[in-house]
């Protein structure tokens, strides 16, 4: 095994050119004065498994897994953390140097960490999650693990919402009316990405909510703008991306990077991209 590559981590996805992960992780490595490097690798689905094994055999630190490969990673990795098991989705692979691969999903806990940064109380909360995909399932599992009292799932396809509800014992299929009694509202869909669309009708928003939108372009989505207008606390999707990356580095390296350094790097990359 080539131990020299133990300083390299990568993100696998397709398309991957717009990923912020290299900027985020490389800034964190530099701040910690580590000679590590993080790269993006565009991998089509038919070559995903081959690329994972090649990365393992090369002795890399680990991998981030993004669309469309999270389900394939779940099928490939036999040992994984609880959130990955419950959500059926893996976004992180850790290599231990012995050939064994471990899987994790940091999306859910990254979401919860971002919420906690802004004062959200998750234990005994009433949450509404919009969406039922891999990210939603990870968020639901993490909320359940952290003691949420009730998780209502809103999704256009009820059967998918029913499937996502299996990720936590307190989760169920919900409706927009659940928002009126909720303390947390989390949009995990792509609705609002680069548009003024909103994932929920703003008439349901209220000042007792903490609203997190996983979309981070624009940073202040139409949903977050409307939430601010009614006095709700808002958390942009970039914080979720940052905190899931923090957890990835903890898994790969056993170190906790500075989230503010990572966010500054991401903001700089976004400014260059959309200037």
Image (cartoon, rainbow, N blue to C red):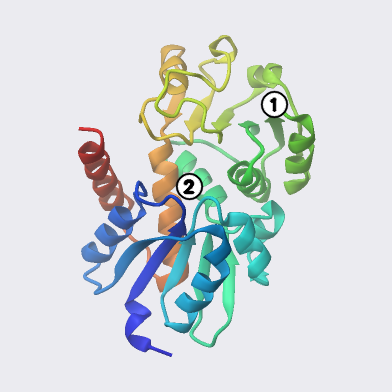
Return the x and y of residue 52 as percentages of the image width and height. 52, 71
236 displayed left or right of 92: left
Q: Is 84 in front, or is 109?
A: 84
Residue visible at 21% across and 70% down in the picture: 33
Left or right: 9 with respect to 146? left
Along the polypeptide, which appears first: circle 2 or circle 1? Answer: 2
Coordinates of residue 78 in the picture (x, y in percent): 68, 72
Residue 172 higher or lower than 87, as above or below: above
Quadrant for the N terminus in the image: bottom left
Residue beneath the point at 46% across and 36% down: 119
Is residue 203 toward the left or the right of residue 150 in the image?
left
Give the quarter of the figure containing the C terminus.
top left
Please give the residue where the numbered disc 1 appears in the rendered image. 156
From the top left corner, tell me how far across and down residue 266 is, in percent: 29, 46
Residue found at the very far top of the displayed protein: 203
Residue drawn where x is 57% and y is 63% of the image: 46
Q: Is residue 184 above or below residue 12?
A: above
**Nearer the viewer's eye, disc 2 or disc 1?**
1
Residue 42, position as x, y percentages in the image: 42, 58
Residue drawn at x 44%, y 29% as measured from the top left? 193
Q: CA distance from mark 2 to mark 1?
A: 27 Å
State the image quarter where residue 11 is shown. Answer: bottom left
Q: Is residue 50 above or below residue 270?
A: below
Under circle 1, the secondary element is loop
- Crowd around label 1: few <14 · some 14–19 · many ≥20 (10 Å): few
Report the disc number at residue 113.
2
Instruction: State the residue in front, 220 or 185.
Output: 220
């Amino acid at each position: 095994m080539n131990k020299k590559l133990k300083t390299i981590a990568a993100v696998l996805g397709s398309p991957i050119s717009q990923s912020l992960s290299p900027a985020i992780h490389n800034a964190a490595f530099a701040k910690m004065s580590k000679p590590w490097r993080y790269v993006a690798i565009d991998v089509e689905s038919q070559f995903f498994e081959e690329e994972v094994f090649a990365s393992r055999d090369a002795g890399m630190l680990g991998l981030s897994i993004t669309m469309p490969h999270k389900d394939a990673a779940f099928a490939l990795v036999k040992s994984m953390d609880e959130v990955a098991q419950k959500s059926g989705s893996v976004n992180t692979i850790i290599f231990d140097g012995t050939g064994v691969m471990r899987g994790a999903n940091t999306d859910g806990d990254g979401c919860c960490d971002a919420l906690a940064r802004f004062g959200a109380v998750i234990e005994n909360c009433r949450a509404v999650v919009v969406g039922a995909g891999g990210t939603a399932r990870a968020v639901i599992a993490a909320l359940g693990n952290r003691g949420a009292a009730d998780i209502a799932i809103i999704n256009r396809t009820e059967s998918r919402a029913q499937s996502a509800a299996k990720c936590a014992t307190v989760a169920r299929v919900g409706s927009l009316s659940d928002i009126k009694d909720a303390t947390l509202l989390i949009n995990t869909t792509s609705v609002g990405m680069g548009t003024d669309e909103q994932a929920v009708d703003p008439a349901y928003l209220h000042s007792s909510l903490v609203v997190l939108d996983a979309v981070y372009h624009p940073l202040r989505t139409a949903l977050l703008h409307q939430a601010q207008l009614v006095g709700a606390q808002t958390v942009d999707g970039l914080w979720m991306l940052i905190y899931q990356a923090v957890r990835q580095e903890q898994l790969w390296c056993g170190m906790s990077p500075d989230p503010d350094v990572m966010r500054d790097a991401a903001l700089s990359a976004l400014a260059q991209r959309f200037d």
